[in-house]
Amino acid sequence: MQRPLAGLTWRNAGGEAVAGVTLLAIAVPLNIGYAQIAGLPPTAGLYALVLPAIVYALIVSSRQLVASPDAAAAALVASSIGGLAVAGSADYLTLAFAQAIICGVLFAFAAVLKLGFLANFLSKPILVGFVGGLALDILVSQIAKMLGVKIDSGAEFTDKVGALVTGLPTLNGWSVLIAALSVVVLVVGKRVARAVPWALIVLVVATVAVVASGLEAQGVSVLGPVDAGPPTLTWPVLDWGRWLALIPSAIALTLVTMAEGLLVARSYGEKHRYGTSPNRDLLAFGAANVAAGATGGFAVGSSTSRTAAMDQAGSRTQLPSLVAAVGTLLLLVFGTGLLEHIPSPAIGAIVGVAIIPLLGIREFGELWRQDRFEFAIGAVCFVVTVLIGAIPGIFVAFVLALINLAQRASSPAIDVLEADGDPHSSLLDPAPRGATTAPGIVIIRLAAPLFFANGSVFADAVKRAVTSASGVRNVVLDLEAVTDIDVTGAEAFAGLKAWLHDNGVALSFSRPRTELVDWMRDLGVLDDERLYPTNRAALADLGAPSVG
């Protein structure tokens, strides 16, 4: 079993600690903003950087993946809990804590049962559409902050857009100026010097400017008082009905984190040549979420942007997360007074710039060029998430994933193989339509498992191959690529066998996998038909003149 903090040595400890300071500078302003998106106090975002980050860093197999609340998780929390309680109320906080704990249990459940494969149902188009829809919903709220316009951030998307438009006459010029300058610094600074924590610089400078100029009196909104003190252990007390009401949103949060987190962890592991364990990573997410819910935080996911920042800083261990946790704890104990006068327009600018890439504009362009059907899937998911909500969006995402899977699985490659006259070569190339592999013999290859989505398609393809050629007396099915057969596929195959028998065509199999043969007998797919180790052996035994 991999030891905690794998990759950390005395030689690289100094550099890793410096990277931790950078992570602290990035995480504090973002987590404050994400807590506001979720309808929670700033401390909820900061608490999620302490014990959850420590627990995660000590368990996870990935040396670089950073765990923290992110924009998508914050939006999901707001949209799912907003219908159950009033944002900012004690009941709302309790529900957010309970939701994080349910996420933790689901992650642990997935780790024990090795269910990480479920995240594969969220393909790239679906993730792009779903996260892009959440990002657009968040962006409207951040634009309102930057303009100094008051809107209900927990309202539906169309209501927020309407409130923003009708509230434009009330915009605050100082807020617009602070936001505009913040955006310029963030965008230009990132291009000039990526390693500099520009978000922290923006917060510090903007706060000093607001305090020195007395802009609060001019209508510029500020963060307000932040409770001082370290996180304390607690447990949300709810009736069973409310616990159950949180399960759908917790499932959505879990799946999105699984899909994104495991992919990012694997990609960085491959990039830097170290191993990762998906199930251990799921367990780490589970422990982090339980810790978040038990210490006043909210749902913890993977942070792709912070992971990339740490990679660019040269970090190859989880030490930066521990350093950031200690720094956040010190801030909570001694420095919350410094946060009180942070201007909301600056927070809105920081979060807005951070989520612009999540809109998926470039990814949608790539999907449009590569595959219009995949683009349509992403677009539908985007629209549903924006106009109807995050939970319907994740449901539609799964339905679209199943439709996409069934559509592709229902039309697998089914080829009649062509003999080339060389007795030492493999039969791999498909023959023209209406051709036979050898006189009176057709060898057909199915390049997919035989199951409910393609059973009848395969049977029809075999019938066409027989009827479109002349004098076919033997059909050999090449099963090398068939890894499984389900009951529905077996029923379709039984009908095919009867049809072949009625038409005087003998059936044989070649290259079946060893474990598949017994299963074929159990399903009634294989009776007394002949089995051949190779296609060449089938041709030779059936008397093809081209062999020998």
Image: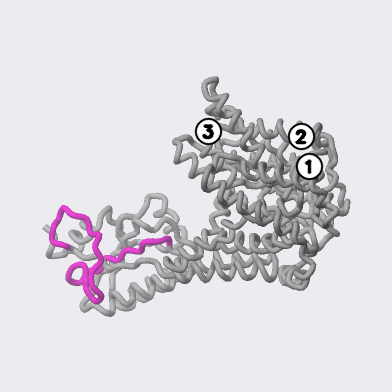
**Horizontal and vertical percent for residue 397?**
60, 64
Q: Amino acid at mark 2?
A: Leu
Q: Is residue 124 visible?
A: yes
Among the 4 quarters of the image, the one containing residue 426: bottom left
Q: Amino acid at mark 3?
A: Arg
Front in this rendered view, residue 72 or 247: 72
**Horizontal and vertical percent for residue 56?**
65, 37
Q: Which mark is residue 290?
A: none
The structure residue drawn at horizontal position 67% and vertical position 46%, both measured from the top left corner, is: 202
Element at label 2: helix
Q: Are marks 1 and 2 in contact (CB under 8 Å)?
A: yes
Instruction: Specify start and end residues of the magenta stretch as a single range.
Output: 420-449
Q: CA distance from mark 1 to mark 3?
A: 31 Å
Other-residue count near label 1 (Cα within 10 Å), few / some / many at <14 / 14–19 / ≥20: many
**Horizontal and vertical percent for residue 424?**
16, 53
Q: Quadrant of the C terminus?
A: bottom left
Front in this rendered view, residue 422 or 341: 341
Element at label 1: loop
Q: Quadrant of the N terminus?
A: top right
**Horizontal and vertical percent for residue 186?**
61, 49
Any magenta on residue 135? Answer: no
Q: Amino acid at mark 1?
A: Leu
Residue at numbered disc 2: 331
Q: Is residue 101 visible?
A: no
Answer with mark 2 or mark 3, whichever residue precedes in sequence.
Answer: 3
Relative horizontal placement of residue 22, taking residue 36 as reference (left or right): left
The structure residue drawn at horizontal position 57% and vertical position 56%, both measured from the top left corner, is: 357
Residue at numbered disc 3: 316
Any magenta on residue 433? Answer: yes
**Residue lying farthest to the front in this orientation:** 213
Answer with mark 1 or mark 3, whichever residue precedes in sequence.
Answer: 3
Q: Is residue 59 above or below residue 542?
A: above
